[in-house]
Amino acid sequence: MALALDAVPWLEPPFEIFEFKPCEWAAFHVTAYKIGKMNIAPRWPGAPSAKAILAIRLFVDPKTKPAYPHYWDITPSRLVSQLAAMLTRGIPPGAYLRVHRDVAGPKAHFSVEWAPTV
């Protein structure tokens, strides 16, 4: 699924960016989602002070993330593309979205799946 930056709305703050750890699974009990864009401050040498990127906001069950806000913002571009394709097909009732990151850095790849439990 191709997403165009100019075709999606801006996500409203506060931002809650999830930092995926290499070689670890993360699980989300997703109840809804929103595809949008946000500005980030890249950290690499010579980077612009701000850059607009595509992101997906995953709204999660408050029991699995009791602290406000009850969502996570997902920003890695490869993962955003994968998740957009999965989420637009529907969220399986009661399922958890599981995400695995292979390596650190911008060359990371992700495995994603729906699972009945964490």
Image (cartoon, rainbow, N blue to C red):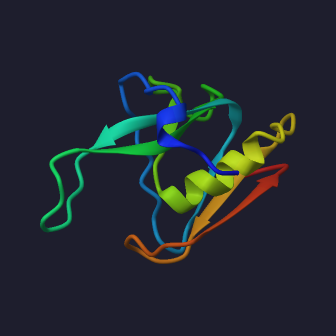
Residue 61 coordinates in the image, percent (x, y): 65, 28
Q: State the image coordinates of residue 3 (x, y, percent, origin top left).
A: 60, 45
Q: Quadrant of residue 95?
A: top right
Coordinates of residue 44 in the picture (x, y in percent): 20, 66
Decide: is 91 above or below 32.
below
Q: Examine the image and state in which quarter residue 16 appears.
A: top left
**Residue 36 visible to an observer of this rendering:** no
Report the side of 10 relative to 110 (left or right): left
Left or right: residue 67 versus residue 112 is: left
Q: Residue at x 66, y 57 (%)?
A: 82
What's the residue at 70%, 51% (across, down)?
1
Viewer-side residue, 16 vs 34: 34
Taking depth in this image into account, of 39 and 103 the one nearest to the observer is 39
Q: Position of residue 101 (x, y in %)?
A: 55, 68
Label tally: 0
Q: Residue at x 44, y 36 (%)?
A: 37
**In this view, 24 is above or below 40:** below
- The one nearer the camera, 81 or 118, is 81
- In the image, 111 versus 2, the foreground residue is 2
Question: Is residue 85 shown to the viewer in this render?
Answer: yes
Quarter of the rendering containing residue 30? top right
Q: Is residue 28 placed above or below 100 in the rendered structure?
A: above
Q: Which residue is drawn at 53% across and 31% down?
A: 8
